[in-house]
Amino acid sequence: MVLLGLMVLLFALVVSDLHSLPWFINVSESQGPGTILQSFSFNCSSSTPTLELLNVQPPTTFFNPPSLTRWQGIYVGKVTLSSSARLDALAVNHYELQLRFTCGNRVMEGPLSVDVQRDPGHIQCVGRFASPAGEIIQVPETVTPGARLYTLLLPGLELQGAQMNIISAQDPPHFPGPFSINEQGWLRAPSQGLKGQAQKVFQLQILVSFGQGHHCHGMLMVKVLPTPSGQVSFLKQAQNVTIPENWVPGSEVVQVRARGFDVRYEILSPVPSPLFSIGRTDGIVRTTAPLQAARAIGAAVTRVQVKAFEHLQPWTSAELDFTVNVRSVNRWPPRCLPALLVTQIPETAPMGTVLNTLTCADTDFADVTLDYQLWFHSPPGSASLRLRDKTLEVNATLDCDTPGACFQHAASILVLDGGQPQMTTEVPVLVMVTPVNEFSPACAPLTFRVREDARPHTLLGSVVGTDMDYPHNSIKYYIPGGPATFAVDPLSGKVHLLGPLDYEQQRLYRLTVLLIDHSQDQDPTCHRSGSCTITIEVEDVNDHAPECDPPFQELTIYTPLGRSIEVTKVSCWIPQEPQRLAFSYSIMGGNSRSRFSLQGAVLVHNDFVLGPPWPEPPCTYELLIRVADAGPSIPHLSTTATITVHLFPWSTSTVATSNHRMTVPSMMPPLLMKNTEAFWQPEPWFVVVLTATGALLLLALGWLLSRLLCRLAKVLQAPSKPAQALLLNCIQRTEGSIEGFMEAPRMEMSQAPSSIINLHFDGRAQYSRTGRDYLFNTRTGSHRWL
């Protein structure tokens, strides 16, 4: 027969009392030395473990010390039969081994129960009957003819229907008659009796046949004793003994004593006796098997008949009857399935959710009522779980949104039976509560202000999101499809400026910030999102300087004595910010003798000298006018306008002093030239044409220059003439008489020459940028290019 059952020892389970989890194995009595009875697997990483066999009940040398080997990171222990093992189910059918496992500082003990099973194919003749010397029995010569002398007990043969025959010769004169033996092993005396055969020994060779082809043989020697001279009697008569069923095999039940010479004891009934045996010499009745099996075979109350006889005169005997009551004992705690309750539930599980249902049974009493109690370990006193009868349920709303709450609930279910003593089974419970993403993140609208001259990567502020799920505020921030001017840090929510700002182009930005939570659900792909709007207001910074049109003016004026006249008005503005109209004006340079002043944007010439006109030659002033924007915006930016003024004194001999101010408007607007450099490779024919055209242009410019030099020489030849008359004469020689097309203004001085008043152009100047000369009228402002 092979090993009927293998169980794997799981020491990793958190069980404080290993005696509450017994291990049972069944082994056939045919198993010989070296047979592996049980294998165990252990996990031990702290040190080298040990596995010890502490004791065996009943004591025997049939079991080797357990071995412990390491295989693939796991320690495997084995319990084997020793070389002296001779298992016999009828002698002892139950052994209990106490094992101890040590791993570092952790020591665990547990029992291993070994039940020896009968093996019908292993039955053989055993004992002194099968030995070469044989079994010797003594009978008195006065025995009744045909009386039962001896009962041959061969273990297991009663189940196999064994046939027993005496095969040795029993012929006279050595035998008074033949002995006989039946199928029950009863040896009977010859029908002639044994009178007169005292001190003789009869050898009987007996053949035992059972099954098909199975047999054994042994020797019985019958020694005939003379007539006894004494008597055997028990000291006490009928007795009633009560013993608990948890006694181990070999426990003493009772001791019987008989009076006589060299008394021996044997059990007459029941035969065979599966539960009890008696000491042949001491009369001590002992148990031979676990008594809990008595109920299974209906032997809870057993009537035992014991015979006491003299060793030399076995026919001198006495009999004693007593009753053994086997009292039930609560030996085993309840067995529960599952032995370890581990489950996982989401935090949104409603009250009353069933986690698991225990199935427990008591091996001692089938109809006992078990009591269930729930004990909490971590957190202590938790009200999240409840035990309703055998069912573990959710008792209160679970919540993972509090720090330290959403981890696990460790508890134990204690199952108690009603026996004496009361036995308890502890079922460890581990309930892991998993988080569920229940809430969406949110944030409040914010407004940030930033100067338009802020540099890139400037921190504008932070978006603070909130999320009620644990861990709190586990949020990432995004700006979906937003402008590239701003960015938000995904982890901190800080908003940064990435590009330049322009208050004049866009003053207000509205951005939508998307919030997405993470790591708040058992499913890592489960996310919730929210959003809020942030407003970014751009603060205006004065970053554009004024521009003047034209930036350069060249004017020629005639100044009357002792009067102030307006020269020109500076016209400036800011094209990018047309709403800015406040400017400050100041003369920064070129105002020698303080001849000029500014009245707002108007340039005024001041002449407070009284008397005849000055004899100095005409003067030229190059004035630098600083134009700066005004107002609260800082910094104040400025630009410089250049005004070149040719100043001619207004002589009384030439022209009368006017009683109104004379203004010289600006000439034609300045030319704005834009140079663009580009690579150009013309065709050869175009180069030839361009060269010829350039030559003709140079000839024309040379002729024009010579004419201008001629006119200038004539002007210089008459220095004594007044400047106005000389200029007018040169104009008349060059251009001829020109009819006046507008009426000259009235003069206060009646002595003014009529030839000057009637002229259309009374001034001549040269444009500084091109060098070209032109004539102008100081009254009307009209001009003519030369």
Image: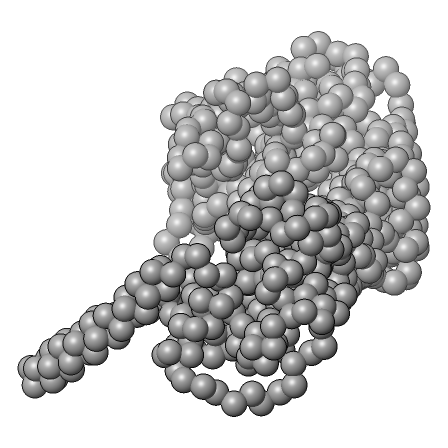
Q: Tell me what residue is drawn at x 55 percent, y 48 percent.
A: 615
The extreme front residue here reads: 751
Color theme of the render: one colour
- 675 or 524: nearer the eye? 675
- 311 or 38: nearer the eye? 38
- 509 or 19: nearer the eye? 509
Left or right of 427 in this view: 543: left
Left or right of 220 in this view: 758: right
Q: Tell me what residue is drawn at x 43 percent, y 73 percent.
A: 729
Question: Where's residue 137, x and y in %?
Answer: 55, 25
Left or right of 619 in this view: 597: right
- 435 to 191, vertically: above or below: below
Question: Where's residue 663, x and y in %?
Answer: 66, 67
- 96 to 716, vertically: above or below: above
Left or right of 222 in this view: 435: right
Question: Where's residue 215, x and y in %?
Answer: 40, 46
- Number of numbered labels in the structure image: 0
- 744 to 325, vertically: above or below: below
Among the 4 quarters of the image, the one containing residue 773:
bottom left
